[in-house]
């Protein structure tokens, strides 16, 4: 076992308040990520203080999910929040530095919630078949 | 109030080997605001887990970055091993430590060269890279690859270092150390270098924490936080204390990296002395089911992998948060208020690695 | 006053031989054990297609029926995974890194 990791379920409405509590204790924002689980998105907000790892987690619907922005507490969250809104289509409300979907240049919208690669993107051919 | 102009910096710029774009709002010669944009080379690598099985994926993880390649592979393997509860042989742990530190040395020397080039010290750049070449030779002899080591696998290591090779390596490192001392002396003591670095781009301790900075950027601001303290690989058995500086300026970040060069050498020597004999890999059976946030210290800072498996041979989710991604907000903060001429130096002090930022 | 701290080093290197070589006239010294070009000892191969299945970049194409073993050199990343899985141990990675090419072609054995 490398480290203990605490995973806490948090309601999206309480997210900003909970993040503020950690911020006041001196926690550092480690990362924000989304994971697609079938028809749902699992959101993870990770924080760290002197290598004590705390992770907030909640679920959102696959499309049309909304989360409040925590850039008011941790300004650095803007990169992660733009990332999840570009790749997963999660709407982040109140992002302090919102790129409005132009953070990543992707061929299609929200590529990380699509089921499979659409036919318009050629699959890598088997050798010799090119 | 002066006249405001927006100057685009990048994606093509002499100091940038990789594309990042920053819009600099300048007032006379002062930068007032900086707005970064990345995403020129987003590869969508994270979704490749759905195509490749978890054993093969280590080759892809290694290729996220061309500089900290080994540590990417190591982070991935440690994450999967943690999920699958695999106990890696001690010798493999030591091997990973040695290779990890070798890659730290070569990465920091690469950065030293780029930095010297950034502030216009061409000969220092050449000499840093000449020394780095010797480190690359050691890496090639022990792993078979110069930048992509390919020597880490789920369950252990793919290659062993023989006793003769180990002796040769330690002898080579003596030579490298002497050369590094000369180079570090220039970085730390030369007036013209100090003139460019001291007091430029100050990040206070509180800012570094709230901006989520990692690695030398964080340690340069007086926070002695280093993921190696998690005691992964062999770090639990080695004597090691993180290096930090308190000034928070470019010079401190530079000093942290310079000191880490010798610290890494010391770690390699300790590991070589304590290295046990025995197996280097265990057989892996079954598929990962579970999740883990794997955190490892790379030359540029902490890397976080989120790995989630559902009991099939393909993982459900693989997410990589690379150190440069976490350092971008700190960079934005540094740039606000600096002189236009300092922008290249400041961009380089976070040791940007854009390709790994955009998996 | 640490003015031009590098002068000693630069002076010393003025009189030394350059560390760079005149490649390609003088070939690069290759460390033993370097992972380079993939070589196959085709007489030992049993066309089991294991290497084809495992190769992470799909550089290999093994035809069991016609006993053909083909490789796309430009796809191979010299990772050595095929070498590990081959049951007959007929694959090796040589130190030589191959020659440049201008066309994408499959090499057939
Ligand atoms: S794994 Fe070995 S024996 Fe099997 S097809 Fe490939 S080269 Fe031939
Ligand atoms: S060395 Fe790796 S990439 Fe090359 S053919 Fe073998 S498995 Fe494929």
Image: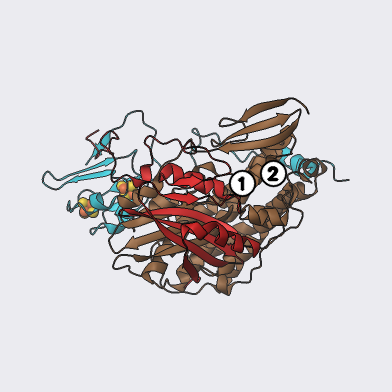
Chain colours: A red, B brown, C cyan
Query: Residue at image x 47%, y 67%?
Result: A7
Position of A2 with respect to B261 (left or right) is left
Label 1 and label 2 in one chain: yes
Confirm whether residue B356 shows in the render. Answer: no
Position of C57 with respect to B149 (left or right) is left
Q: Chain of mark 2?
A: B
Q: Are marks 1 and 2 in contact (CB under 8 Å)?
A: no
CA gap between label 1 and label 2 equals 9 Å
Q: Which residue is mark 2?
A: B334
Secondary structure of the residue carrying numbered label 1: helix
Q: Position of residue A106 (x, y in %)?
A: 41, 36
| Nearest to the observer: residue A99 or residue B306 | A99
Q: Position of residue B337 (x, y in %)?
A: 74, 39
Position of A68 with respect to B115 (left or right) is left
Confirm whether residue A117 shows in the render. Answer: yes
Neighbor class of circle 2 (other Cα within 10 Å; few <14, some 14-19, many 20+) is many
Secondary structure of the residue carrying numbered label 2: helix
Q: Which residue is mark 1?
A: B329
| Nearest to the observer: residue B197 or residue B315 | B315
Q: Position of residue B53 (x, y in %)?
A: 30, 55
Query: Residue at image x 17%, y 53%?
Result: C46
């Amino acid at each position: 076992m490398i480290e203990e990791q605490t995973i806490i379920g948090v309601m999206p409405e309480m997210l900003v308040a909970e993040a503020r509590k950690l911020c006041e204790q001196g926690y550092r924002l480690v990362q924000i990520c989304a994971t697609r689980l079938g028809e749902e998105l699992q959101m993870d907000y990770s924080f760290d203080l002197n290598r004590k790892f705390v992770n907030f987690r909640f679920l959102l619907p696959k499309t049309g999910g909304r989360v409040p922005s925590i850039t008011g507490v941790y300004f650095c969250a803007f990169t992660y929040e733009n990332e999840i809104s570009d790749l997963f289509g999660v709407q982040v409300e109140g992002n302090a530095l919102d790129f409005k979907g132009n953070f990543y240049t992707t061929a299609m919208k929200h590529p990380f919630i699509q089921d499979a690669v659409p036919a318009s993107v050629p699959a890598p051919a088997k050798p010799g078949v090119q | 109030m002066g006249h405001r102009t927006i100057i685009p910096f990048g994606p093509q710029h002499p100091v940038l080997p990789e594309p990042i774009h920053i819009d600099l709002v300048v007032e006379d010669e002062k930068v007032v605001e900086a707005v970064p944009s990345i995403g020129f080379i987003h590869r969508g690598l994270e979704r490749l887990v759905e195509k490749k099985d978890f054993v093969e994926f280590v080759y892809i993880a290694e290729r996220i970055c061309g500089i900290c390649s080994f540590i990417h592979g190591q982070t991935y393997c440690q994450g999967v091993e943690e999920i699958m509860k695999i106990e890696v042989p001690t010798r493999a742990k030591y091997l990973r430590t040695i290779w990890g530190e070798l890659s730290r040395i070569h990465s920091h020397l690469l950065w030293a060269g780029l930095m010297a080039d950034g502030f216009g010290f061409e000969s220092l750049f050449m000499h840093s890279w000449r020394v780095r070449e010797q480190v690359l030779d050691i890496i090639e002899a022990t792993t078979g690859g110069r930048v992509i080591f390919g020597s880490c696998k789920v369950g252990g290591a793919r290659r062993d270092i023989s006793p003769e090779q180990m002796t040769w390596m330690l002898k080579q490192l003596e030579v490298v150390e002497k050369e590094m001392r000369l180079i570090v002396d220039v970085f730390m003591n030369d007036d013209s270098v100090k003139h460019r670095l001291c007091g430029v781009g100050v990040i206070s301790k509180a800012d570094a924490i709230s901006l989520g900075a990692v690695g030398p950027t964080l340690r340069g601001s007086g926070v002695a936080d280093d993921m190696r303290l998690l005691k992964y690989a062999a770090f639990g058995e080695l004597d090691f204390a993180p290096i930090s500086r308190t000034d928070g300026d470019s010079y401190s970040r530079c000093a942290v990296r310079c000191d880490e060069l010798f610290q890494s050498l010391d770690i390699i020597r300790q590991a070589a002395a304590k290295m046990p004999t025995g197996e280097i890999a265990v057989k892996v059976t079954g598929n990962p089911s579970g999740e883990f946030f794997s955190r490892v210290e790379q030359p540029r800072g902490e890397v976080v992998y989120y790995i989630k498996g559902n009991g099939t041979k393909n993982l459900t989710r693989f997410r990589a948060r690379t150190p440069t991604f976490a350092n971008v907000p700190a960079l934005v903060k540094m740039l606000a208020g600096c002189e236009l001429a300092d922008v290249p130096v400041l961009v380089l002090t976070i040791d940007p690695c854009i390709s790994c930022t955009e998996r | 006053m640490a003015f031009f701290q590098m002068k000693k080093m630069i002076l010393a290197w003025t009189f030394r031989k350059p560390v760079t070589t005149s490649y390609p006239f003088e070939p690069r010294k290759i460390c033993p054990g370097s992972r380079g070009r993939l070589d196959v000892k085709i007489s030992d191969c049993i066309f089991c297609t294991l290497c084809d299945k495992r190769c992470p970049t799909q550089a290999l194409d093994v035809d069991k029926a016609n006993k053909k073993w083909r490789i796309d050199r430009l796809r191979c990343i010299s990772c050595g995974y095929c070498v590990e899985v081959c049951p007959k141990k007929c694959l090796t990675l040589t130190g030589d890194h191959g020659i440049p090419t201008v066309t994408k072609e499959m090499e057939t054995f």
